[in-house]
């Protein structure tokens, strides 16, 4: 499959770059990096971190984000994998749903509709993390739809 529309190439490029950047940050934090770590974990209303992820968790998230980046390449036709098209469509739809659910969550601490907004994480989540998740979710929906349509 080739990329049929410029908007698909743009969506794939933006989503791929965001996913690889996020994966790189998680590897950095897994290796003990500190920059950005205070704003990267949800905090209670009094500013305490709700959890402290260890290196294994950081590397697991980095791996998942890297797999999602490869999936973007597959959906855009830039990468070929020996997987049935139905599996690719299901994986793309799942990624889209996960990122959209993260962005549009009514959870207390994450998503556009969160209750705790005044913490450092809350502010970053409102202006950076949730918009990125909305963009990624929308990108996966678009890429998956175009890939699915190309199968017909």
Image (cartoon, rainbow, N blue to C red):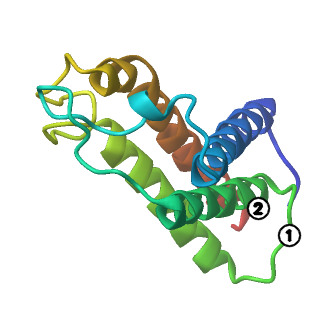
Question: In the picture provided, is 60 more to the left or to the right than 101?
Answer: right
Please give the name of the residue rendered at 53% of the width and 57% of the height, measured from the top-left corner.
58
- Indicate which disc, 2 or 1, sits on the residue closer to the N terminus: 2
Please give the name of the residue rendered at 86% of the width and 62% of the height, measured from the top-left corner.
79
Question: Which of these two is toward me, 83 or 106?
Answer: 106
**Residue 130 percent coordinates (x, y):** 39, 30
Measure the alpha-carbon separation of dots 2 and 1.
Answer: 6 Å
Quick one: label 1, few (<14), some, or many (20+) residues within 10 Å?
Answer: few
**Residue 44 percent coordinates (x, y):** 15, 34
Judging by the rendered image, the residue that carries numbered circle 1 is 80
Q: Is residue 83 above or below residue 79?
A: below
Residue 120 figure quarter: top left
Q: Is residue 52 above or below residue 10?
A: below
Question: In the picture provided, is 50 more to the left or to the right than 87?
Answer: left
Q: Secondary structure at mark 2?
A: helix
**Residue 62 percent coordinates (x, y):** 61, 57
Question: Which of these two is toward me, 101 or 142?
Answer: 101
**Residue 123 percent coordinates (x, y):** 32, 17
Judging by the rendered image, the residue that carries numbered circle 2 is 74
Please give the name of the residue rendered at 26% of the width and 39% of the height, measured from the top-left corner.
49
Please give the name of the residue rendered at 69% of the width and 67% of the height, measured from the top-left corner.
152
Question: Which of these two is toward me, 59 or 77?
Answer: 59
Q: Is residue 113 above or below residue 150?
A: above
Q: Secondary structure at mark 1?
A: loop
- In what quadrant of the picture does the N terminus appear? bottom right
Total count of labels: 2
Quick one: label 2, few (<14), some, or many (20+) residues within 10 Å?
Answer: many
Q: Cβ–Cβ below 8 Å for labels 2 and 1?
A: yes
Residue 15 figure quarter: top right
Q: Which mark is residue 122?
A: none
């Amino acid at each position: 499959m080739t990329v049929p529309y410029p908007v698909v190439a743009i969506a794939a490029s933006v989503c791929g770059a965001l996913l690889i950047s996020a994966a790189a940050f998680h590897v950095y934090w897994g290796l003990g990096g500190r920059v950005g770590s205070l704003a990267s974990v949800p905090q209670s209303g009094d500013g305490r971190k709700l959890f402290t992820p260890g290196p294994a968790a950081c590397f697991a998230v980095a791996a998942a984000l890297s797999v999602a980046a490869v999936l973007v390449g597959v959906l855009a036709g830039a990468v070929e994998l020996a997987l049935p098209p139905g599996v690719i469509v299901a994986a793309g739809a799942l990624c889209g749903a996960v990122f959209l659910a993260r962005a549009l969550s009514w959870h207390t601490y994450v998503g556009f509709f969160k209750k705790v907004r005044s913490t450092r994480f809350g502010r970053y989540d409102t202006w950076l993390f949730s918009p990125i998740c909305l963009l990624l979710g929308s990108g996966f929906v678009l890429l998956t739809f175009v890939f699915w349509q190309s199968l017909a």
